[in-house]
Image (spheres, grey):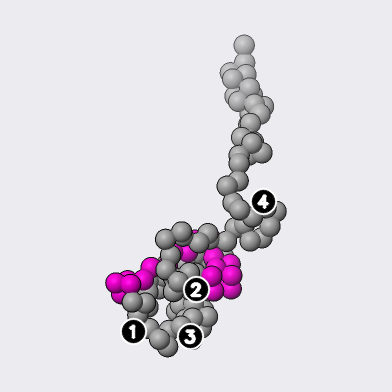
Amino acid sequence: MSLFRPLQSLVSARIVRPSFSSIRSYSSQPAHSPESTLAPLQPDYTEGERTIHEKLANQLQATKLRVADISGGCGSMYAVQIASPLFRGQSLVKQHRMVTELLKDDIKGMHGIQIKTEAA
């Protein structure tokens, strides 16, 4: 009996990977659409939150995005959390500049904005 017999059976064993073909997609977009990976709108968004969300999601291909009016509902201050593949390799300052450049017209009417970014 060879000492290597158990090792050979481990080396020759096939690794079975799970099949993801049976997983359902719950997106309103077709699975092959590039828009299906964009962060979805939250149903409880205010008009201002929705406007900011749509701009950022479309222009920055956001995969995760949450916009919150933190001014008590008057729309003078927002918090934005966003993840985008376009942020890969960019400094934190550059990521924030990308966001503020897209929102520059909106920011003119705000008292402030909080931005948290991450590369997706």
Between the C-alphas of marks 4 and 1, the distance is 39 Å
Which element is circle 2 on?
A: helix
Amino acid type, mark 4: Ala
Compared across the picture, whether 2 is left or right of 56 comes to: right
Residue 31 shows which numbered tag?
A: 4
Q: Quadrant of residue 21?
A: top right
Q: Is residue 80 magenta?
A: no
Q: Dot 3, how many residues are within 10 Å of its Cα: few (below 14), some (14-19), or many (20+)?
A: few
User: Mark 4, mark 2: which one is toward the viewer?
Assistant: 2
Residue 73, position as x, y percentages in the image: 33, 72
Q: Who's the residue at 60% across and 46% down the image?
A: 25
Few, some or many residues within 10 Å of mark 4 (<14, 14–19, 20+) = few
Against 45, residue 21 (above or below) is above
Looking at the image, residue 18 lies above or below residue 90: above
Task: Give the extent of the magenta segment.
Answer: 54-73
Q: Is residue 71 visible?
A: yes
Q: Secondary structure at mark 3?
A: helix
The dot on residue 104 is 3
Q: How would you rate the neighbour count of disc 2 (Cα within 10 Å): few for under 14, some for 14-19, many for 20 or more?
A: some
Residue 69 or residue 9, whichever sits in front: 69
Q: Is residue 114 visible?
A: no
Dot placed on the residue nearer the N-terminal end, 4 or 3: 4
Q: Earlier in the sequence, mark 4 or mark 2?
A: 4
Residue at mark 2:
51
Image location (x, y in percent) of residue 66: 44, 64
